[in-house]
Image (cartoon, rainbow, N blue to C red):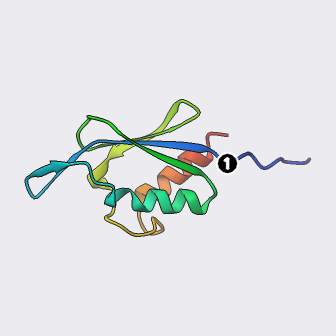
Amino acid sequence: MCTIMPEKAKVHVYYGPYDCLGYVAFRESRLDGIRTLLEKNEHEVHFHRIEDRDQVRVMVNGEMVYECTIQGLDFGGDGLLDPKCQEILRAVNSTY
């Protein structure tokens, strides 16, 4: 039986602002691990701001495959040690 490797996904990450030291703003520093890990696995990553506070939603092919709070993600890094980033990668890879 021959298996064909699927095309890499176009991943859309929607994220809202969150509170840090009393200042609510859009920040991508907690999303660095997602970007690094997905791009390392040859996925194309696009970030979009949304108004839903403290939310992260990951969409592939128009379908939401993962949702969490942005503060549940590790600050910075490559995503290898962040359990949420690993869950996101598995969710994206399992959409095929």
Please tell me in which quadrant of the rendered image residue 61 appears.
top right
Rendering coords of residue 69 (x, y %): 30, 46
Residue at the spot x=45%, y=68% of the render? Answer: 78
Q: Secondary structure at mark 1?
A: loop
Q: Which residue is mark 1?
A: 8
Image quadrant containing the C terminus: top right
Residue type at the position of mark 1 = Lys
Residue at the spot x=23%, y=39% of the render? Answer: 53
Rendering coords of residue 85 (x, y %): 45, 57
Rendering coords of residue 84 (x, y %): 41, 55
Q: Residue furthest left?
A: 22
Neighbor class of circle 1 (other Cα within 10 Å; few <14, some 14-19, many 20+) is some
Q: Is residue 67 left or right of residue 20?
A: right
Instruction: Tell which of 83 and 32 is nearer to you.
Output: 32
Instruction: Tell which of 19 and 46 is nearer to you.
Output: 46
Q: Is residue 88 left or right of residue 30?
A: right
